[in-house]
Image (spheres, rainbow, N blue to C red):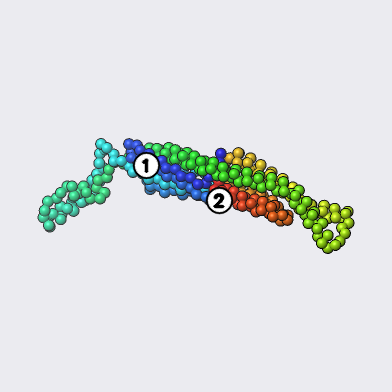
Amino acid sequence: MLYSMTGFAREEMKAVWGTAIWEMRSVNQRYLETSFRLPESFRQLENVLREKLRNSLSRGKVECFLRVELAPVADAALNINYPLATQILNAMTELQKVAGGEIQLMDVLRYPGVVTPAEQDLDAIAQALLVGFDETLAAFIQSRAREGEKLSDVIEQRLQGIEMEIAHVQKAMPDVLNWQRQRLQQRFEEAQLEADPQRFEQEMVMLAQRLDVAEELDRLQLHVKEIRHILQKGGAVGRKLDFMMQELNREANTLASKSINASVTASAVELKVLIEQMREQIQNLE
């Protein structure tokens, strides 16, 4: 199976401790690059999360986001900072002697730091968040796989186009050589020169050797076959396929340099277009 470097996944978690949302997205990158945006309370999970990504992905710039809203703890005793509350109460008593008025205990309790709600078990929540991350990662990989399947179809279409151009050139080459023979013979006639039949055939043999593209066509066919093999094998094949594009392009350039016929030249140009279109798609593969 092929995997694109572009993907997105979003999973929402709901539990008694609150709600959490994982988001994961990625774009093209030569290597694997990961970044995380986590609440400060769960920052310690970053190393574990990064290792999970490294074990599952090979390439791409991956961004992970986590949003957590903790629910209030029900039926839990409040934590009161008695030393701080005592200091505040003593200070208010002294102020009462000067300014008068009554001391309201609720004012003491509202002072920052005097009352804190009971804390939840963050370790247990962190374990639940890791399970949620694994589910998000699985959905994220599936997203990249679906995109990779689409890219594979596009590449296969271009490979079929390359095969059509190869077949066209193979069919056209006998006519090209015959045309070149007639053209050479016509030049001799226009110059009113009598060509030595033996020398004429030697020239035709040399010309045919210079124009022979059978080797380039064979290599193009072999490269197409190898690309299909790589696609079927699947996995992280982006770099391999990028190298194969270089090999295809080399043969297309050689074919164009040997061409003396508009039809063959057009096929060479079309080959380069198809190869470039494949290269653009391959840049998205892991």
Left or right? Give the position of 285 relative to 72: right
Q: Residue 199: image x %, image y %?
A: 87, 56
Left or right? Give the position of 232 relative to 14: right
Name the residue that disc number 2 marks. Answer: 30
- Quadrant of residue 128 within the rendered picture: top left
Give the number of marks: 2
* Residue 30 visible from this viewpoint: yes
Q: Residue 190: image x %, image y %?
A: 82, 62
- Quadrant of residue 237 within the rendered picture: top right
- Decide which of 135, 130 is in the foreground and name it: 135
Q: Secondary structure at mark 1?
A: strand
- Decide which of 177, 51 is in the foreground and name it: 177
Question: What residue sits 12% from the left and 51% below the top?
Answer: 102
Name the residue that disc number 1 marks. Answer: 20
**Which mark sits nearer the N-terminus, 1 or 2?**
1
Q: Residue 262: image x %, image y %?
A: 69, 55
Residue type at numbered disc 2: Arg
* Residue 3 visible from this viewpoint: no
Left or right? Give the position of 185 relative to 124: right
